[in-house]
Image (spheres, rainbow, N blue to C red):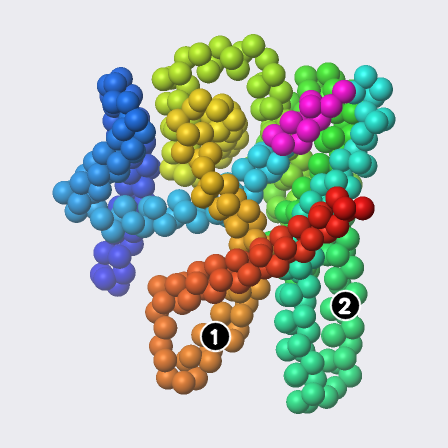
């Protein structure tokens, strides 16, 4: 009993320290970045803006004996970033490009020359080849396992299960698994793509219908209401009347992304860029807060647009770093990783780790994670190469005709 009390007391102490750790990290980074930004250092300014602050943070936690708490905090923030924030950031960025496509066209005819259906079909055409390849590979993998189990011990139940698997793939193939209810998708993380396509259709359609009313009234109201609902403790996978929450989770940040792009068309964006040092500091600190405050309600809904504005400015520090070939290629690669990670995780957990344990080989969590990353990287490079090769052949063939 005494030991349990000590353990609980220790846990409470760490939990109490957690907000202080985050605030300390943020303040050190902010002050260090501000001081360095005021010093003229030429081309070395950007590296020197980053590395000394990281060194100070490591020194702080090392001297104070808080290494374990620091690592625990970083791991917790990373989980929150992946589970909660990354999905919303994905939709905000997608909304930015939706707005870019909309405002790049003439809509004097009310969007008839390029309607919401045209936008949706073009969108699906661009993402569907990779999506279909990943989905087909996952389905064939699980189908092969089901057929092996059926051959080893035949039964009508297993035949029915295989038939049901085919039936359940219909919404997946049509990118409709997030249309009306929770669908037990095989590659479940891909619900984000279907939600993106469906919600994007309505966002683009509203812009075509009445751009001014949508921008000034409908989108801000939708953002406020949907985000309030999402952070009120509701089940993120439930239906609420006509509305299915995954679609709302896509609709709100898409609206934010559209409004972010519209801001770039106003004189206010030019005035903001004119204050170069302050603007770049705001962009860098926004990137930090997306990670450091990942679990703090809706703050990333504010910091993500600021980060996007910085990336969109060709003269910004962030753009100077990210607008390189290695990062552009990594962008394509990250899409393949997103599509394939569920399949590789299933293979590692269901086949690789149990097989190693059966042979008396014990794998630590770090070793299992390393194997997963290596396999995921190799498989994603392969699928990306195959799909891009196929798309290039189709593109060249169409150009010849």
Q: CA distance from mark 1 to mark 2?
A: 26 Å
Compared across the picture, whether 252 is left or right of 163 comes to: left
Compared across the picture, whether 116 is left or right of 17 comes to: right
Residue 166: assigned label: 2
Say above or below: 75 vs 184: above
Q: Tell me residue 55's x, y (percent).
A: 22, 38
Compared across the picture, whether 206 is left or right of 73 comes to: right
Q: Tell me residue 261's x, y (percent).
A: 60, 24
Q: Does residue 41 appear in the picture of this structure?
A: yes
In the image, which residues are magenta? Answer: 96-106
**N-terminal-most mark, 1 or 2:** 2
Q: Tell me residue 183's x, y (percent).
A: 71, 56
Circle 1 sits on which residue?
A: 352
Classed neighbour count for the residue bearing mark 2: other residues with Cα under 10 Å, few (<14), some (14–19), many (≥20) = few
Between 231 and 25, the one nearer to me in the picture: 25
Q: Residue at x 36, y 50 (%)?
A: 75
Q: Residue at x 53, y 54 (%)?
A: 337
Residue 214 inside the magenta-drawn segment: no
Which structural element holds mark 1? Answer: helix
Q: Residue at x 78, y 83 (%)?
A: 156
Between 293 and 264, the one nearer to me in the picture: 264
Classed neighbour count for the residue bearing mark 1: other residues with Cα under 10 Å, few (<14), some (14–19), many (≥20) = some
Quadrant in which the N terminus appears: bottom left
Say above or below: 367 vs 124: below
Main SS category, magenta section: helix
Say above or below: 301 vs 187: above
């Amino acid at each position: 009993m005494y030991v349990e009390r000590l353990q609980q007391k220790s846990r409470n102490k760490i939990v109490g320290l957690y907000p202080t750790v985050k605030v300390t990290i943020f303040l050190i980074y902010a002050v260090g970045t501000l001081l360095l930004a005021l010093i003229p250092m030429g081309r070395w300014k950007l590296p020197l803006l980053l590395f000394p602050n990281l060194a100070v943070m490591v020194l702080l936690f090392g001297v104070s004996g808080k290494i374990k708490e620091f690592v625990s905090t970083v791991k917790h923030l990373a989980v929150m970033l992946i589970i909660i924030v990354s999905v919303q950031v994905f939709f905000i960025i997608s909304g930015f490009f939706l707005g870019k496509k909309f405002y790049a066209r003439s809509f004097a005819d009310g969007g008839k020359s390029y309607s919401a259906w045209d936008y949706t079909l073009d969108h699906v055409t661009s993402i569907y080849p990779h999506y279909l390849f990943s989905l087909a590979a996952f389905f064939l993998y699980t189908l092969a396992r089901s057929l092996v189990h059926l051959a080893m011990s035949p039964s009508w139940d297993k035949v029915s299960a295989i038939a049901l698997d085919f039936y359940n793939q219909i919404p997946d193939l049509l990118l409709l698994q997030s249309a009306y209810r929770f669908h037990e998708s095989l590659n479940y993380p891909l619900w984000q793509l279907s939600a993106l396509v469906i919600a994007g259709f309505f966002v683009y359609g509203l812009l075509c219908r009445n751009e001014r009313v949508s921008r000034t009234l409908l989108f801000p109201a939708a953002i406020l209401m949907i985000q309030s609902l999402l952070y009120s403790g509701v089940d993120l996978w439930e239906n609420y009347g006509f509305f299915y929450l995954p679609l709302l989770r896509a609709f709100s940040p898409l609206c934010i992304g559209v409004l972010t792009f519209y801001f770039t068309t106003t004189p206010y964006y030019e005035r903001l860029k004119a204050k170069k040092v302050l603007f770049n500091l705001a962009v860098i600190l926004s990137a930090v807060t997306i990670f450091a405050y990942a679990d703090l309600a809706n703050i990333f809904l504010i910091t993500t647009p600021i980060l996007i504005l910085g990336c969109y400015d060709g003269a910004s520090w962030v753009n100077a770093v990210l607008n390189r070939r290695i990062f552009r290629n990594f962008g394509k690669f990250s899409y393949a990783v997103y599509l394939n990670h569920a399949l590789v995780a299933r293979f590692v957990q269901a086949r690789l780790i149990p097989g190693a344990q059966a042979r008396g080989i014990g794998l630590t969590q770090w070793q299992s994670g390393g194997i997963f990353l290596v396999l995921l990287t190799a498989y994603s490079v392969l699928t990306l190469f195959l799909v891009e090769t196929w798309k290039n052949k189709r593109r060249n063939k169409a150009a010849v005709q």
